Amino acid sequence: MSLSTAALRRPDLVERSDYFDHRTLHQVLDADACRQVIELVDAGAGDRTAYVDPQGKVTRHADVWWLPPEGDARAVIERLVALVRQVNEDYFFFDLDDIQEADFQLTRYGPGHFYGWHTDVGKDHLSRRKLSVVVQLSDPGSYVGCNLQFHGHEQQIEQAARAQGSVTIFPSFRSHAVSKLIWGERWSLVGWIEGPPFR
């Protein structure tokens, strides 16, 4: 067989990410583990947030607690960071910092609480955020509303999984929101994995 008639093998191509997509891993934490994460909260150390934009409009209303990357929270944070890094290697292909920990925040939404449309990137150190992580800690039957939403293709609204213990990972520059909570209480664990500037 001559070279001109030989079948040439096409090299394996890695499917590139759709950067306006998200990835969800189900049953990462069981119900007991979710409860234990919520119990890490120090009630006296919380911060009731009501962010107001320059026009005076409230853009976020929730209660938040920052988790230190040590103590009882460390094992959970390390596990989540490892999961994010694996999803990144398989799908997003971002350059991430070589770290085993990251900033994580427990968030509680009560009736009327919400988070308007936003991205997780900004000035200074916020510009280094590459991937955002949201862990659903509450049983979806324990609240109404309060859905994590994304702007999809052609501005369609996509809703993230509500299953307790699921983990949703997405590029930090992707527009997202949390709809208003109608009834009940929703807890989530949110984190950001950083990396060198995009270029």
Image (spheres, rainbow, N blue to C red):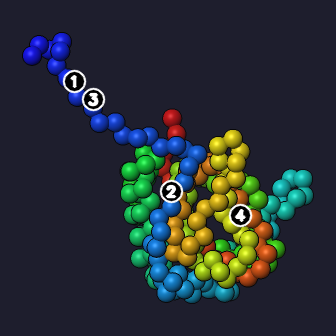
Residue 76 drawn at (x, y percent): 45, 75
Q: Is 168 drawn above or below residue 140 in the view shown?
A: above
Tell me which residue sits at (88%, 59%) in the image: 57
Residue at label 1?
A: 8
Q: Earlier in the sequence, mark 3 or mark 2?
A: 3
Q: Quadrant of the N terminus?
A: top left
Amino acid at the residue labelled 3: Arg
Amino acid at the residue labelled 2: Arg
Task: Please tell me whether mark 4 or mark 3 is closer to you in this view.
Answer: 3
Residue 193 drawn at (x, y percent): 50, 57
Q: For numbered disc 1, what is the local secondary structure? A: loop
Q: Is 5 drawn above or below residue 179 in the view shown?
A: above
Q: Quadrant of residue 153?
A: top right
Amino acid at the residue labelled 1: Leu
Task: Please tell me whether mark 1 or mark 4 is closer to you in this view.
Answer: 1
Residue at label 2?
A: 23
Tell me which residue sits at (84%, 62%) in the image: 58
Residue 36 drawn at (x, y percent): 51, 86
Residue 137, numbered circle: none
Residue 32 drawn at (x, y percent): 49, 87
Q: Residue furthest left?
A: 1
Question: How many marks overall?
Answer: 4
Tell me which residue sits at (58%, 83%) in the image: 38
Per the model, the C-alpha gap separating discs 4 and 2 is 17 Å
Q: Earlier in the sequence, mark 1 or mark 4?
A: 1
Left/right placement of residue 5 relative to residue 108 reads left
